Image: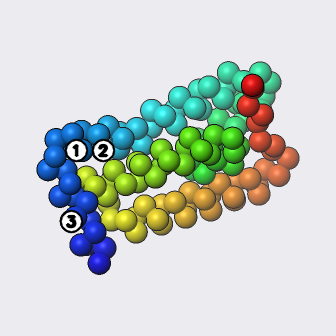
Amino acid sequence: MEILLCRTLNQSTRHQTIRRFFAGVSRLGDGPVWYTLMGALVLNPGWKGAVASLQMGLTALVGIALAWLPGLSPLLLPLVLLIALSRVVLGLHYPSDGLVGGIIGYGLARLSLWLYPAATPLQMAS
């Protein structure tokens, strides 16, 4: 069933517009969005921004971003889902790869926050 889903999604890339869109989204998952977020956190006054950026780099970028900045979840979750979908559409991964990757990322984020219990989420400036 998973192979059938992958083939169906991959066949959608016959359309040049769809292929270009998902290729661009897939490239975002390679780092630019996450590196930009980490750089912005370092600019946060005080030491918490640098600590959060370092922690993100060492443990699962997506999981930590959602844990440290829950206010960004409405923005980050759709992006993460689009990146995961793009990898399936482009034939790079099976859907179960994305699911397991998400579970691993969430687990790493929880472990990281458990290891650093004194850490508190950053407050977004209004």
**Image disc number at residue 22:** 2
Instruction: Please name the residue that numbered disc 1 is placed on.
Output: 19
Q: Quadrant of residue 46?
A: top right
Residue in front for this viewpoint, 119 or 82: 82
Image side of residue 87 versus residue 113, left or right: left
The x, y position of residue 33, in whole percent, is: 49, 34
- Compared with residue 35, is residue 73 higher up or lower down, i.e. above or below? below
Gap between marks 3 and 2 measured at Cα: 15 Å
Marks 1 & 2, CB-CB < 8 Å contact: yes
**Image disc number at residue 91:** none
Amino acid type, residue under disc 3 in the picture: Arg
Which quarter shows the C terminus? top right
* SS at badge 2: helix
Instruction: Using the rendered image of the protein, determine whether residue 92 is visible from the camera's viewpoint.
Output: no
* SS at badge 1: helix
The x, y position of residue 113, in whole percent, is: 74, 53
* SS at badge 3: helix
Gap between marks 3 and 1 measured at Cα: 14 Å
Marks 3 & 2, CB-CB < 8 Å contact: no
Which callout, 3 or 1, points at the residue further toward the start of the chain? 3
Gap between marks 1 and 2 measured at Cα: 5 Å
Amino acid type, residue under disc 2 in the picture: Phe
Image side of residue 6 versus residue 34, left or right: left
Instruction: Please name the residue that numbered disc 3 is placed on.
Output: 7
